[in-house]
Image (cartoon, rainbow, N blue to C red):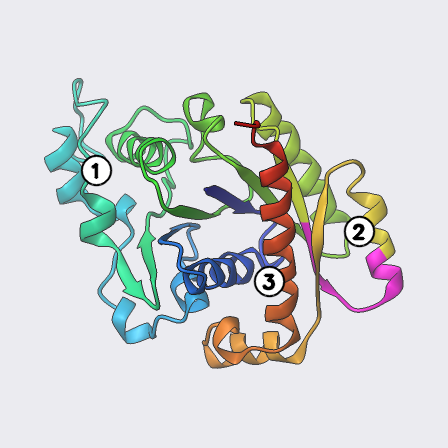
Amino acid sequence: MKIAVTGKGGVGKTTLSGTLARLYAAAGRPVLAIDADPDTNLAASVGIPAERMAGVAPLSTMDDLIEERTGARPGAQAPYFKLNPRVSDLPDTLAVTHEGVRVMVMGTVKTGGGGCICPENVMLRSLMRHLLLERNEVVILDMVAGIEHLGRATADAVDAFIVVVEPGQRSVQTAHTIRRLAGEIGITRIYVVGNKVRTAEERAFIEQAVGDMPLLGLIHYHPEIIEADRRGMALYDIGGEGVAEVRAIQQELDRRLAERKPAP
């Protein structure tokens, strides 16, 4: 199963990604969680102590490794480099494991545009193809607000593209923009999760504003979610109604994906 989670900054997509990762791992599924957001907060959401991640750099900033694999150093003038570098070993050698979840910090390319033909971007896209097309475990991608790391070659491998929204126009507008961009490369399994919901009016707003995008469920504004963020802990480790709501979202996602599978 391959799940991509995205949304406007600050809507809670990383909390959802990390909690889903822990839930699938607790169910006995091998899980690889990929932090593809420049803020790199997924490890904390999974529950990995900050000291364990202190020396972990995003793959996108590992110039020596990128040069070794592609034959060109990021930022240098290199007319030729490998477009299909070896990446199959990276999830095993660079990931940090915690409670059955392996977390890998991929990062993103900040210069030259997301689609630039540069060694670091080639490296990231090669890794993404490997993760989505060749890995058998549950892969959860915590992404920036868009489809930067995805392309037509990997669109069919995304089982679920989850957009997290909060009760606000800008968040919902971002969701519709992401849906349009995803549709342009062939991603059709797009779902919505509502977060930070406090009232019946906010619930109704999300249900109406997302239109015909399937709503997997809602996460309300629970005190334990605030506490987890304040203490730098995983919501899963604190527990409470927030985790129960994410579990319900997981179950709804599994149900919808099972319905899409062709009969044997």
The answer to which quarter of the image holds residue 251 is bottom right
What label does residue 88 carry, if any? 1
Tell me the element at label 1. Answer: loop
Local crowd at mark 1 within 10 Å, few (<14), some, or many (≥20)?
Answer: some
What label does residue 247 carry, if any? 3
Q: Outermost residue, front direction?
A: 264
What label does residue 206 carry, if any? 2
Region in magenta:
193-203
Disc 1 or 3, which lies upstream in sequence? 1
Residue 31: x and y, percent?
38, 53
Please, what is the three-letter code of the amino acid marked with disc 1? Ser
Tell me the element at label 3. Answer: helix
The correct choice, above or below, for 252 with respect to 156 in the image is: below
Quarter containing the N terminus: top left
Residue 137: x and y, percent?
36, 46
Q: Nearer the viewer, residue 117 or 226?
A: 226
Please, what is the three-letter code of the amino acid marked with disc 3? Arg
In this picture, residue 100 sits left or right of residue 64? right
Residue drawn at x 33%, y 53% as measured from the top left: 105
Say if the magenta span includes residue 183. Answer: no
Disc 2 or 3, which lies upstream in sequence? 2
Tell me the element at label 2. Answer: helix
Q: Nearer the viewer, residue 166 or 96?
A: 96
Residue drawn at x 81%, y 38% as measured from the top left: 211
Local crowd at mark 2 within 10 Å, few (<14), some, or many (≥20)?
Answer: many
